[in-house]
Amino acid sequence: MGIIARQTIKGSAYSALGAIIGFINIGLIMPQIFSTAEIGLTNLLISLSAIFGQLGTLGFMNVSVKLFPYFKDSKNKNNGFLFLLLSVGTLGFIICAIAYYIWKPFLVNSNVQSSPLFAEYVYLLIPLIFISIFYLLVDSYNRVLFNASFGLFVKEFLLRILNLAGIILFYLDVFDFHAFIIYYTIAYGVPLLLICLLLLYKNQLSIKPSFLILDKKFIREIISVAAFGLISGFSTIAVFQVDRYLINHYCDLSATGVYSTAFFFGTIILLPARALIRISSSIIGEDIKQDNWGKIKNIYSQSTHNLLLLSVFMFILIWGNINNIMKFLPAEFESGRYVILFISLAFVVQSVSAISGVIIQYSKYYRQHSYLMLFLIVLIVVLNIVLLPDYGIDGAALASFISFVSVGLIQIVYVKIKFNAQPYNYKHLVMILLGGFAYFISWLIPDFGSLIIDLFVRSAIISIIYILPLLIAGYSPETSDMLKKIFQFFVKRDNK
């Protein structure tokens, strides 16, 4: 796992730094200076553009990972693969733009009373959709060239720095809200621009067409992979975004703002899994092509082990400090308390089952993965429709929890049946039980009165109770090695 290990460490570091900045942006500053409706607007625009953007790729992100090895040829500029991607992206954007203009009157009329701010700025969906489509396609190309950590740097870290700058300018009255939302839109295009510049610097930004390897049989394979990739990709992004649209529909933009802020705390749990998936998917795609199932099973085993350790740790840190989190936020965000619980638990399951989904997606059973993702989006929409009217944003979070647990278990069982790969053992149960014990001890700790002191002491106790025994018992050699290297680095610096 040399490439995966290096890229995952770098990607996780960027994601972690981005999460800290995201917490400052979303958890600390925005709730204090923006209204819940304004927060809801920024999240709803990004959510809808992400859904449209995924549709606009026409499934070619899946083609990048699954079929790029057949195009790969540095001497021939990868046989025109980037030209193919950009051509598909252009077609996809035209289709999405037409769909937007057809749907726009409904969007405006249905929101002009309950969410007037969204109706006012709905036009920003067009540039955001364009950015989303081409970022997804160019980033997928960058990833299969094994530059995945750079994509994480510009999207997870740099973009949040740019957003923080915009928030500060709004706070200082340099921007009014109109200027801020325009700046916010422009900032989302920066990662796309920087990835293009990286490809240009590495002489990998060739848009010269080539049709040498595109015979009829291969074209049919591309269309098949793209079609099922479209279903899978759309469903994957929709399950993370569609709830905001439904909340805005059944509640209002303010409820969307509260939900989005609470949702952010749960997504912290997914950061290591996202970094690992971005990097390992290309490796797994290559190994499946070479029928190297021994290596794939090794990746599966190590990944699920480390992801469970990290996701349980982050869950108990978040839920163990839930009262402190609520103190950080204005009073109107109290209604998001159980959103944090359900979304966090859902993403623990999502993290642990993540690699099983990657294996299915890039194997010969990719069609089944698409059907499974389609089932997931149907399930989450139906559960939202059932639960939202009676339970509000808690119902939306519960819908996500039920959906992710159901599909996660199906993926794990499917991989066991089809590939005889089952990475779970007693160590996973020990990590879960130890996490429960660490949370129980934190629950017994009385409130220290001071928010900072309570947060520090409670987090330190949780960390010691959970992490220390696992490291001593050797449950995560990778984590132990990383900590040793960090320690040796600082010792060497002190000795100079």
Image (cartoon, rainbow, N blue to C red):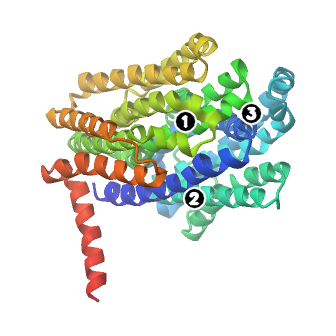
Quarter of the image for residue 438 reads top left
Regarding residue 78, the answer to whether it shows in the image is no
Asked if disc 3 and disc 2 are in contact, CB closer than 8 Å, the reply is no
C-alpha separation, residue under disc 1 versus residue under disc 3: 27 Å
* Residue occupying the far front of the picture: 449
Q: Position of residue 380 (x, y in %)?
A: 53, 19
Element marked by disc 3: helix
- Neighbor class of circle 3 (other Cα within 10 Å; few <14, some 14-19, many 20+) is many
Upstream in sequence: badge 2 or badge 1: 2
Which residue is tagged 3?
Answer: 96
Q: Which mark is residue 67?
A: none
Q: Amino acid at mark 2?
A: Val
* Residue occupying the far bottom of the picture: 496
Say which residue appears at 26% left-offset and 70% top-offset.
487
Element marked by disc 2: helix
Which residue is tagged 1?
Answer: 263
Question: Considering only vertical position in the picture, is 106 above or below 230?
Answer: above
Which residue is tagged 2?
Answer: 154
Element marked by disc 1: helix
